[in-house]
Amino acid sequence: MNLGLQNKNALVCGSTQGIGRATAISLAAEGANVTLVARNEEKLKAVLAELPNNNQHHYYLVADFTDPEDLKRKMEAINISFHILINNTGGPAGGPVFNASLDEFERAFTMHLKCNHVLVQALVPGMKNAGYGRIINIISTSVKQPLDGLGVSNTIRGAVANWSKTMANELGQFGITVNNVLPGATETERLNEIIQNKANKTGKNAEEVAEAMKNAAPAKRFAKPEETAAVVTFLASELAGYINGINLPVDGGRTKSL
């Protein structure tokens, strides 16, 4: 199957680990030129060296998503017209929503919505000129079903999903699609943190917590980052041009809603 990604330029955020890294590798394997974005330059260099390269042009950008104005300046300095944007940022710390501080909400809103918006505003003009754009936001199944103990995340993820749907309605006429991928429990460092936090709070060991989380999905296992990356790669392709404004769970069937 030819996904039509040869010579497409993709910006992949949070691409030094987990789903972001797997997505960058997957897009590069399909022929896209990939620009990695994260805050750790050494890790960016390591992933850059891993990217499949068949006469492609891969780059990286060091950026901290706690500072949208700095991100905006860095995007203005890039002389690349992008066809694909993968918004992907590490989730907020866990905890009950009632106990969350205003600063926690502000930080999460900045990292997950403000910076997404900075990137969209920077890249959409080039997408319009090309008549081709794919904006894919890696969010969470909490968009459909809030997750216990992730109060701030549930709140902000919902805001990003509604922002995305609104953007899809506005940009679809230009050949630009905006979709959300909602990972379930995936084998990443973030999942390890969630498991350990649950273990600390419940008094159970990490293995028991992990087994209970696996059993919550009909698949009875965790996802691999590469499985979610494959879905993202398809949504970025020419073949997915009529898929727009959706929330697509990749969770082994865990989410109870349709």
Image (cartoon, rainbow, N blue to C red):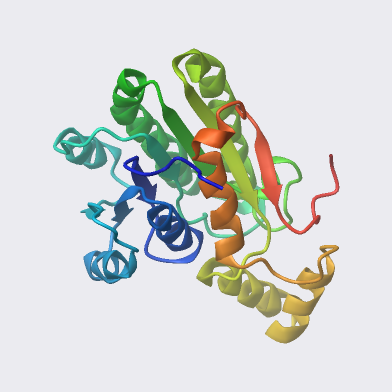
Percent coordinates x, y for residue 253 in the rendering? 81, 55
The number of numbered badges drawn on the structure is 0
The answer to which of 84 and 154 lies nearer the viewer is: 84
Q: Quadrant of the C terminus?
A: top right
Picture residue at 32% right of the left edge, 67% below the top = 47
Percent coordinates x, y for residue 125 in the rendering? 30, 21
Picture residue at 46% right of the left edge, 34% below the top = 135
Q: Is residue 204 visible?
A: no
The answer to which of 189 and 134 lies nearer the viewer is: 134
The answer to which of 171 and 39 lies nearer the viewer is: 171
**Quarter of the figure with residue 46:** bottom left
Vertical placement of 69 versus 20: above or below?
above
View extreme (front): residue: 1
Vertical placement of 175 versus 97: above or below?
above
Vertical placement of 171 versus 152: above or below?
above
Q: Is residue 57 visible?
A: yes
Residue 32 relative to residue 201: left or right = left
Picture residue at 51% right of the left edge, 60% below the top = 19
Picture residue at 60% right of the left edge, 71% below the top = 187
The answer to which of 24 and 165 lies nearer the viewer is: 24
Percent coordinates x, y for residue 86 in the rendering? 44, 44
